[in-house]
Amino acid sequence: MRQEDREKFVRLANSRVSSALKSIQLIGNLSNRSNYDYTEEDVQKIFRALQDELSACRKKFELANKRQSGTRFTLD
């Protein structure tokens, strides 16, 4: 792995994860019943969407790891 690739990954991961965490905190602010009206079904939809996207993201990393560590076929 090239050092510049690692540095780019760390820089982007720090930025993107921090942004995602801030967005999740803002979603949590929606729980204030004195400011918002929502149903339990609304809450379930929000968390289902977040969980589905998080699972899809994890799967991308798992598949990338499998591709890297898999055996390669050659006709040598």
Image (tube, rainbow, N blue to C red):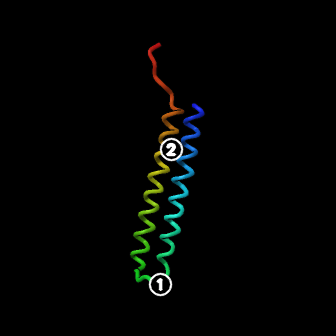
Q: Residue at x 49, y 81 (%)?
A: 32
Residue 32 sits above or below residue 67 on the image: below
Q: Which label is found at residue 33?
A: 1
Residue 43 sits above or below residue 61 on the image: below
Q: Quadrant of the N terminus?
A: top right
Residue type at mark 1: give it: Arg
Q: Residue at x 47, y 70 (%)?
A: 27
Q: Residue at x 49, y 64 (%)?
A: 23
**x and y percentages locating residue 40 in the rendered image:** 42, 78
Residue type at mark 2: give it: Glu
Q: 51 or 19, which is in the foreground?
A: 19
User: On the image, numbered disc 2 is attached to which residue?
Assistant: 62
**x and y percentages locating residue 55 in the rendered image:** 47, 55
Residue 55 sits above or below residue 76 on the image: below
* Marks 1 and 2 close (CB-CB < 8 Å): no
Tell me the distance, in whole angstroms, between the alpha carbons under discs 1 and 2. 39 Å
Numbered-mark total: 2
Q: For the residue labelled by badge 2, is the local secondary structure a helix, a strand or a loop?
A: helix
Q: In the image, 1: left or right of 41?
A: right
Q: Nearer the viewer, mark 1 or mark 2?
A: 1
Label 2 crowd (10 A; few <14 / some 14-19 / many >=20) = few
Instruction: Answer with mark 1 or mark 2, whichever residue precedes in sequence.
Output: 1
**x and y percentages locating residue 54 in the rendered image:** 47, 56
Quarter where residue 8 is shown: top right
Q: For the residue labelled by badge 1, is the local secondary structure a helix, a strand or a loop?
A: loop
Q: 57 or 26, which is in the foreground?
A: 26
